[in-house]
Image (cartoon, helix red, strand yellow):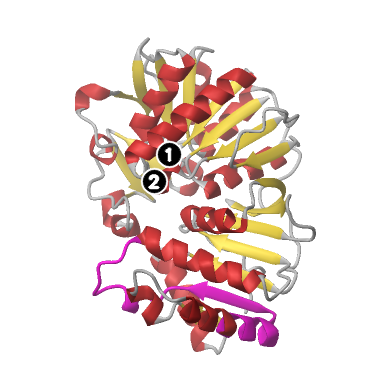
């Protein structure tokens, strides 16, 4: 068994999709299932959206339970652009597992995300000059990897793929090509904790001689209706796509201003918003829940608070409409929703596109959950309004 510890639900789903390519049996959970018989067990912790002290306590507990399972391989899934508490969480894992060293290779050259000379690039542009600079919780203000990880230069080693992994501490592996990822995997021994993004995980599966059965994004199926889209990303392209749907008369419901600005909105306000969404579903069979950036720009509003409000209205909609497909953009938004709905176990069935994963919800018959990171695109046939 391979066990993945993911700090974000969409990251967990993304690796589940990669497991499908290699014909693995996969289970994604929010609580450890010690009795799982899956080839690939992925634990989605959502620690990226927590205060750091809480995140470390969760990772300590999760790692202890995983150690008791004694899997063949443990892989730490981190954000490919290093948002979250990457270093401090890895140190917790090392302590709990009794290991001395970790290899962290976050970049994914296949998506234009590369790391060289201590700096991070998106499609050859320094990352702090991209939309990631506007992330509401982990804004990237420098492309220097030490700065992105919020550590001093002596706290970890950054090296190219021809470097040797030190016997102690965290090594950050630079990578410009998929071949660099393969070289890093070949350097890691059984006493090295592997941490990274989807690119490194693919190289790990290849190193285990797993045979790829399907190509990326070859699974396709029309969206069953009623279908509810929930968009939680601050990514510019996502917001533009939603605005385009709205301008064409499509079924977009922005969070009402009264709910945006209120710390504890009344139940009546949520009921009214839910009624609007249900009306859109009845008319169009699809609806998009989103936030109009113009309602938040001039106010101090936490991303966590907005996620909770979206989760509340989704729960109200579910009580009125038998939703067939729930499609969510953004891992923290997805985690808030599934926690509100008490969903904790999922089985990936198809990779609709890079990072876009469709899953069967264990707790509800005939309900599918599709997730994607905010910076990735919906396949055209999915985003069809």
Picture residue at 39% right of the left edge, 33% below the top: 56
In the image, residue 123 sits, relative to residue 145, either above or below, namely below
Q: Residue furthest toward the right?
A: 365
Percent position (x, y) of residue 177?
46, 36
Tell me if residue 71 is in the magenta stretch: no
Picture residue at 25% right of the left edge, 23% below the top: 155
**Is 210 on the left-hand or right-hand side of 328?**
right
Picture residue at 60% right of the left edge, 77% below the top: 287
Instruction: Locate the C terminus by quadrant.
Output: bottom right
Measure how far apart labels 2 and 1 are at the Cα level.
Answer: 23 Å
Give the residue at mark 1: 107
Taking depth in this image into account, of 326 and 276 the one nearest to the observer is 276
Which of the 4 image quadrants contains residue 280?
bottom right
**Is 217 on the left-hand or right-hand side of 247?**
right
Q: Residues within 10 Å of mark 1 (few under 14, many from 20)?
A: many
**Tags 2 and 1 touching, CB below 8 Å:** no
Stretch in magenta: 276-302
């Amino acid at each position: 068994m391979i066990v993945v510890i993911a700090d974000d639900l969409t990251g967990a789903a993304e690796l589940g999709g990669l497991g499908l390519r290699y014909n693995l049996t996969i289970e994604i959970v929010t609580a450890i299932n010690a009795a799982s018989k899956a080839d690939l067990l992925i634990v989605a912790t959502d620690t990226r959206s927590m205060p750091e002290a809480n995140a470390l306590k969760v990772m300590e507990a999760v790692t202890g339970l995983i150690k008791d399972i004694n899997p063949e391989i443990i892989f730490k899934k981190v954000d490919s652009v290093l948002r979250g508490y990457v270093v401090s969480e890895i140190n917790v894992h090392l302590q709990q597992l009794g290991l001395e060293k970790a290899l962290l290779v976050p970049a994914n050259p296949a998506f234009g995300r590369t790391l060289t000379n201590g700096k991070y690039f998106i499609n050859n542009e320094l990352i702090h000059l991209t939309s990631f600079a506007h992330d509401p919780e982990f804004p990237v203000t420098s492309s220097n990897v030490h700065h992105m990880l919020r550590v001093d230069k002596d706290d970890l080693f950054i090296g190219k793929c021809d470097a040797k992994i030190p016997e102690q501490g965290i090594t950050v592996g630079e990578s410009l090509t998929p071949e660099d990822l393969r070289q890093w995997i070949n350097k890691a021994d059984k006493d090295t904790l592997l941490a990274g993004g989807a690119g490194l995980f693919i190289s790990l599966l290849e190193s285990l001689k797993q045979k790829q059965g399907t190509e990326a994004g070859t699974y396709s199926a029309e969206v069953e209706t009623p279908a509810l889209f929930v968009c939680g990303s601050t990514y510019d392209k996502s917001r533009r796509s939603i605005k385009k749907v709205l301008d064409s008369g499509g079924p977009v419901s922005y969070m009402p201003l009264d709910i945006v600005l209120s710390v504890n909105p009344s139940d009546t306000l949520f009921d009214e918003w839910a009624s609007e969404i249900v009306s859109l579903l009845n008319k169009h069979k699809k609806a998009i829940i989103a936030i109009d950036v113009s309602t938040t720009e001039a106010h101090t509003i936490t991303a966590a608070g907005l996620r909770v409000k979206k989760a509340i209205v989704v729960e109200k909609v579910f009580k009125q409409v038998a939703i067939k497909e729930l499609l969510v953009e953004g891992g923290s938004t997805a985690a808030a929703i599934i926690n509100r709905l008490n969903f904790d176990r999922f089985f990936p069935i198809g990779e609709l596109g890079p990072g876009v994963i469709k899953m069967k919800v264990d707790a509800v018959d005939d309900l599918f959950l599709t997730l994607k990171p905010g910076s990735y695109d919906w396949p055209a046939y999915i985003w069809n309004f």
